[in-house]
Amino acid sequence: MLKIIVGSGEEISRLIAEQFILQIQKKPDSVLGLATGTSPLGVYRNLIEANKKKVVSFSKVTTFNLDEYIGLEGTHNQSYRYFMNVNLFDHIDIDKKNTFVLKGVGDYLAYANNYDNLIEEHGGIDLQILGIGSNGHIAFNEPDTPFDSLTHIADLNESTIKDNSRLFSSIKEVPTKAVTMGLKSIMNARKIVLIAMGKSKAEAVKNLIKGKISKRVPSSILRNHPDVTIYVDQDAYSLVNK
Ligand code: F6R
């Protein structure tokens, strides 16, 4: 059963940050699953503020990120390692050694093949945050990804390349492949929160909440998980009752 919370972008970002803070207060050495993209930025801003005010400490926390572009070094300004450093890790008291992001270059394949084991060795993910693509993807699990997939290499769909091109100087520069946690890897998390904002996500949110559970809509697998909360703003929720 999905829980659904509708609020302004600011409200839902604050509510998700509270979930993370409660999780870490309850278990200081929590393992967190993190996402990149525009959607979680407000959550990360709230976490930075809470850390500055000493409401929460990340000193014992471990994090695993969902995905990374193939071909980008961690120092590239569109790599997800860079994104995480700039938007969260550089501003909190986390030990960077405890922040795991998939590799996009070098031995990325071997690293990917061991990623699920690495998560398991750390005790599994306690709380995972997800965004959602306009085509219903979660992480880079595009439509038709098998539900039992673990971390793997993925080809990005045209629509994802187009959506993400806003962050690159031209569409030609957007990588066409990524390494991503699979749908099963995500489902292994003990608790999941998903955040979606804006009209461009309305169709995907409707399919996630009301459509058939099917490989065509990767996020629909979340309906089989015992502890998932979907946080949406009015625009993202606007098609659910239509
Ligand atoms: C990012 C990720 C992606 C994004 C999704 C939405 O780590 O896994 O699935 O969550 O593409 O991106 P935004 O939030 O930029 O709309």
Image: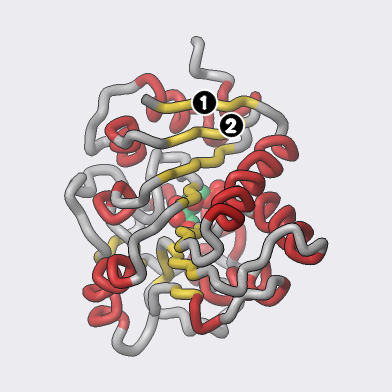
Under tag 1, what secondary structure? strand
What residue is rendered at 49% in x and 17% in y? 240
Q: Is residue 162 visible?
A: no
Q: Which residue is mark 1?
A: 4
Question: Helix or strand or loop: what does disc 2 sit on?
Answer: strand
- Give the Cα distance between marks 1 and 2: 8 Å
Tell me the tag on residue 44: none
Please determine whether, in this image, residue 176 is positioned above or below residue 12.
below
Q: Name the side, left or right, on which 202 lies relative to 175.
A: right
Q: Disc 2 designates what residue?
A: 232
Total numbered badges shown on the rendered structure: 2
Q: For the view shown, which residue lies furthest in the top direction? A: 242
Give the percent coordinates (x, y) of residue 56.
Answer: 69, 60
Question: Residue at horizontal 52%, vertical 26%?
Answer: 4
Q: Position of residue 105 (x, y in %)?
A: 37, 84
Residue 49, position as x, y percentages in the image: 78, 59
Considering only order in the chain, which callout, 2 or 1, is on the residue closer to the N terminus?
A: 1
Q: Amino acid at mark 2?
A: Val
Residue count near mark 2 (Cα–Cα under 10 Å), binned few <14, some 14–19, many ≥20: many
**Residues marked 1 and 2 touching at CB (< 8 Å):** yes
Q: Dividing the picture into quarters, in which one does residue 220 lie?
A: top left
